[in-house]
Image: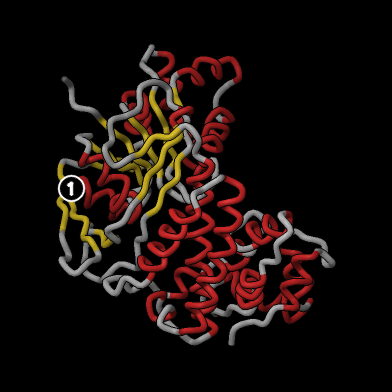
Amino acid sequence: MAEQRALHFGAGNIGRGFIGLLLAEAGYAVTFADVRDDVVEALEREGRYGVILASESRERIPVEGVGAVHSLREAKRLEELVATADLITTAVGPNVLPIIAPALAAGLRLRARSGGPAVDVIACENMIGASSALRRHVLDNVPEYERPGVGRVFGSPNSAVDRIVPEQLPGLGLDVLVEPFYEWVVDASGLAGVAPRVPGATYVEDLAPYIERKLLTVNTGHAAVAYLGHARERETISSSLEDETVRHLATDALQETGTLLVTKHGLDPEEHRKYREKTLARFRNPAITDEVRRVGRAPIRKLGREERLVSPALGLLELGHRPESLASVIRTALRYTDPNDEQAVELQETVAAKGERATLARYADLPEDHPLVELVLEADPVR
């Protein structure tokens, strides 16, 4: 049997330390597509790297037989790789999906014209419906007369991914430090055919509960600890959870999101309680030094209506609950400062000019008299 080939867009820490690792462990020959000269050249030169688990053992898992292609300078080679890959994945960030779409479109057009088999393109991003969004971007870059053919040669299964990749230690080179825990759940209903054999991936028929469970527990919890920890002058996520005020309020906020998840998706309350506790234990991992400023960056985006703090609060209000802990976290987030974060600077400039009510209404896309805005302004920010 011929060797299976995987093409992964994004040779960053998530790409190498999570998805690329699982693909290599599944037996794929992995090629990373990226635009950073130094990373591409190093991967081509070395053909290997290691993934270091952030645990007491500091186990290093070798990843062998990898390659790389420069997404801009080697456009023709990238097109051929897209046309012939057995599996395509991405970990580039939601905002970059439209940027890689033209390259994918070119390769998939070639694949369709040459009669190649269908391939799954799985976007492993911190975004609901990322693969579906990528599919739309790709087809926007295909002439209308070719869209039916191109649409037939690639599947777009959405997925939920979860692995904490902290700030990297100096001197690691291509090696990546990651937490031991990971989860990669793929929506089987979106596959082009038989599910790719990746032992580290779980295939399900209904992805929504997994995506929301992760976003409203891991992402909400991470952001809550970051903003609360910043207010208490803590520098790392793990040290923030040593603060009783932070620990209790973050736990209460996740109990609120748990109420929403259990009600909406019918999750088992006891199983979700264990998941919530495991999540907080991951944040406390002493082997990970995760900076509050890294997790808290881009506060304007994280205060958005569809994001990790405001979205569950709105959902709870619709169910008749008062998300008082989430409201306190949101008000604390409104006071987040970081002179090196453009969004944090803009946030504080807006608060100074317009006040907290108008600022929250603007960035959360809510009327100024919305019940959530009122609840947030009634809440006590952590100091």
Specify the amino acid type for callout 1. Answer: Val
Point out residue 95 in the picture as x, y percentages from the top left corner.
53, 50
Colour scheme of this structure image?
secondary structure
Label 1 environment density (alpha carbons within 10 Å; few <14, some 14–19, many ≥20): many
The image shows residue 135 at horizontal and vertical percentages of 53, 32
Residue 341 as seen in the image, left or right of residue 317 = left
In percent of width and height, residue 44 lies at: 21, 45
Q: Is residue 72 visible?
A: no
Q: Residue furthest top?
A: 115
Give the quadrant of the N terminus.
top left
**Residue 378 found in image quarter:** bottom right
Give whichever of 355, 193 is nearer the camera. Answer: 193
Task: Name the residue located 45 percent from the left edge and 61 percent from the top edge.
Answer: 276
Q: Quadrant of residue 372?
A: bottom right
Residue 158 in sight here = yes
Q: Which residue is mark 1?
A: 63
Left or right: where 98 falls relative to 365: left
* Residue found 22% across the figure and 52% down from its top: 42
Instruction: Judge by depth and name the residue closer to the eye, 317 or 109.
Output: 317
> Taking 63 as reference, is 303 above or below it?
below
Q: Secondary structure at mark 1?
A: strand
- The percent coordinates of residue 269 (x first, y second) are 50, 54
Q: Quadrant of the C terminus?
A: bottom right
| Number of on-image labels | 1
Q: Report the residue at 18% width, 55% height from top.
A: 50
Kindly give the residue lying farthest to the right in the view shown: 369
